Image (cartoon, rainbow, N blue to C red):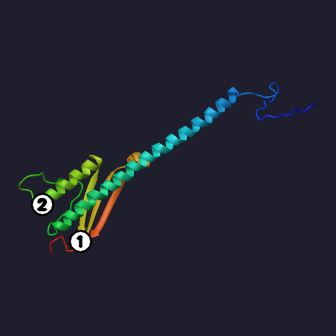
């Protein structure tokens, strides 16, 4: 068998023993691998959207709770104890600052997470605990799962009058 010498760089190999192009099976396997990869990327994106929504809700709940804490500190003489079942007074001229603050707190909670959201304010001596909970079943992958944000802080003066 004689060897061919190629003096130029564009020497072409013999065509009778070499395969040119790709077979259909190779193309299908590469498309399958690409499809599985794209499906995985889509699932990762879907989970990222779920967790981003959950963290956004936690951030918004912290804003609402800190706003209410600032209102309690500004009106320290009033008793702000409030449960989620309590209905705050409507926004009227006869309502006190406390009632308006609680009305705004309730409205902010409903705006945050809808009618399923609940809030409470507990005051014990100089310690104020504000809790906000909402339905977080989308991020938890379980029906009826609730997320709760709780803020506890001390205030400078005892907001409850001595008994």
For image coordinates 27% across by 59% down, the residue present is 65
In the image as oriented, which residue stretches furthest toward the top? 16
Q: Quadrant of the N terminus?
A: top right
Q: Is residue 157 above or below residue 64?
A: below
Where in the figure is residue 115, as x and y percent of width and height? 26, 46
* Left or right relative to 24: residue 51: left
* Left or right relative to 27: residue 1: right
- Nearest to the observer: residue 162 or residue 10: 10
Where in the figure is residue 131, as x and y percent of width and height? 29, 59
From where the camera sits, is residue 137 visible? yes
From where the camera sits, is residue 116 visible? no
Q: Which secondary structure lies at badge 2?
A: helix
Residue 133 got which mark? none
| Mark 2 nearby-residue class (10 Å; few <14, some 14–19, many ≥20) | few
Distance in Å between CA atoms under marks 1 and 2: 18 Å
Q: Write down the residue under mark 2.
A: 97
For image coordinates 14% across by 72% down, the residue present is 161
| Mark 1 nearby-residue class (10 Å; few <14, some 14–19, many ≥20) | some
Q: Is residue 132 above or below residue 9?
A: below
Residue 155 got which mark? 1
Q: Which secondary structure lies at badge 1?
A: loop
| Disc on the earlier residue, 1 or 2 | 2
Q: Is residue 20 above or below residue 128?
A: above
């Amino acid at each position: 068998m004689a060897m061919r010498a190629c003096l130029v760089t564009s020497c072409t190999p013999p065509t009778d023993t070499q395969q040119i192009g790709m077979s259909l099976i190779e193309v299908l396997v590469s498309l399958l691998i690409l499809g599985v990869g794209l499906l995985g990327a889509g699932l990762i994106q879907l989970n990222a959207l779920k967790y981003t929504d959950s963290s956004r809700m936690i951030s918004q709940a912290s804003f609402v709770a800190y706003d209410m804490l600032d209102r309690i500190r500004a009106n320290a003489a009033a008793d702000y104890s409030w449960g989620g079942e309590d209905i705050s007074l409507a926004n009227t001229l006869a309502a006190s600052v406390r009632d308006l603050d609680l009305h705004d707190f309730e409205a902010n909670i409903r705006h945050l997470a809808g009618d399923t959201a609940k809030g409470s304010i507990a005051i014990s001596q100089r310690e104020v605990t504000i809790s906000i909970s909402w339905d977080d079943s989308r991020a938890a992958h379980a029906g009826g799962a609730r997320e709760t944000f709780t803020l506890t802080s001390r205030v400078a003066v005892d907001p409850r009058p001595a008994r």
